[in-house]
């Protein structure tokens, strides 16, 4: 199944007010019973090895700057999807993410049912707070644009 980049949903400001960055990717699947939670779990169940290596490098580089390293320093929330705390969920939409001193981040997984095929959309929203957040976003953007479609392909099972 092919992943397509699409225009982010119109309600991005209600999802993360003031976000300066938003993108969205969509894939069609045949699993008619899939809800947003299960789609998010499939996406975040594992990362490609190259993405894990990049995350390890990221954690090593940002730790001296006082930034979170994959959930370090957090009081564990009751509900997590991969490394991200769940902010809210319905059968059709799951929102995960966190606020940090350099940026606020959300990943939104939407599942719709047009006809006989379900569409799963992953939307990423980022609101930066300072030069560190803007620099961090600029550095990770080329990797983000490869990681999200790779994770979305995992939804197909």
Image: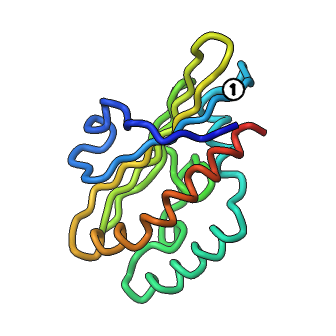
Residue 1 left/right relative to 96: right
Q: Residue at x 72, y 20 (%)?
A: 33
- Reading the image, the residue beneath label 1 is 34
Q: How is the image coloured?
A: rainbow
Above or below, 96 relative to 103:
above
- Residue at point 62% right, 10% down? 115
Position of the N terminus, as image quadrant, is top right
> In the image, what residue occupies the spot 34% across and 54% down?
126
Residue 48 position in % (x across, y down): 70, 62
Furthest-bottom residue in view?
Answer: 64
Q: Secondary structure at mark 1?
A: loop
- Residue 4 lies in what quarter of the image? top right
> In this view, which residue lies farthest toward the right?
157
Residue 53 at x, y = what percent?
65, 76
Q: Residues within 10 Å of mark 1 (few under 14, many from 20)?
A: many
Question: In the image shown, does 146 or 70 lie closer to the viewer?
Answer: 146
Q: Position of residue 69 (x, y in %)?
A: 51, 74
Q: Residue at x 67, y 71 (%)?
A: 50
**In the figure, 83 relative to 132: above or below?**
above
Q: Quadrant of the C terminus?
A: top right
Number of numbered callouts drawn: 1
**Spot occupied by residue 148 in the image (x, y as percentages of width and height):** 55, 52
- Name above or below for residue 87 compared with residue 112: below
Q: Is residue 148 left or right of residue 129?
A: right
> Going by the image, does 70 lie left or right of 134?
right
């Amino acid at each position: 199944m092919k992943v397509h980049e699409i225009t982010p949903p119109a309600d991005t400001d209600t999802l993360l007010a003031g976000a300066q960055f938003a993108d969205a990717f969509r894939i069609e699947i045949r699993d008619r019973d899939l809800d947003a939670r299960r789609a998010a779990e499939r996406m975040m169940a594992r990362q490609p090895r190259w993405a894990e290596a990049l995350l390890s490098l990221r954690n090593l580089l940002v730790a001296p700057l006082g930034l979170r390293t994959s959930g370090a320093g957090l009081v564990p929330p009751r509900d997590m999807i991969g490394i991200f705390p769940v902010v809210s969920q319905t059968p059709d939409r799951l929102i995960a993410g966190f606020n940090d001193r350099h940026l606020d981040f959300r990943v939104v997984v939407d599942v719709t049912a047009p006809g006989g095929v379900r569409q799963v959309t992953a939307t990423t929203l980022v609101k930066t707070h300072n030069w560190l957040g803007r620099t961090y976003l600029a550095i990770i953007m080329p990797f983000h644009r490869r990681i999200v479609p790779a994770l979305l392909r995992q939804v197909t099972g």
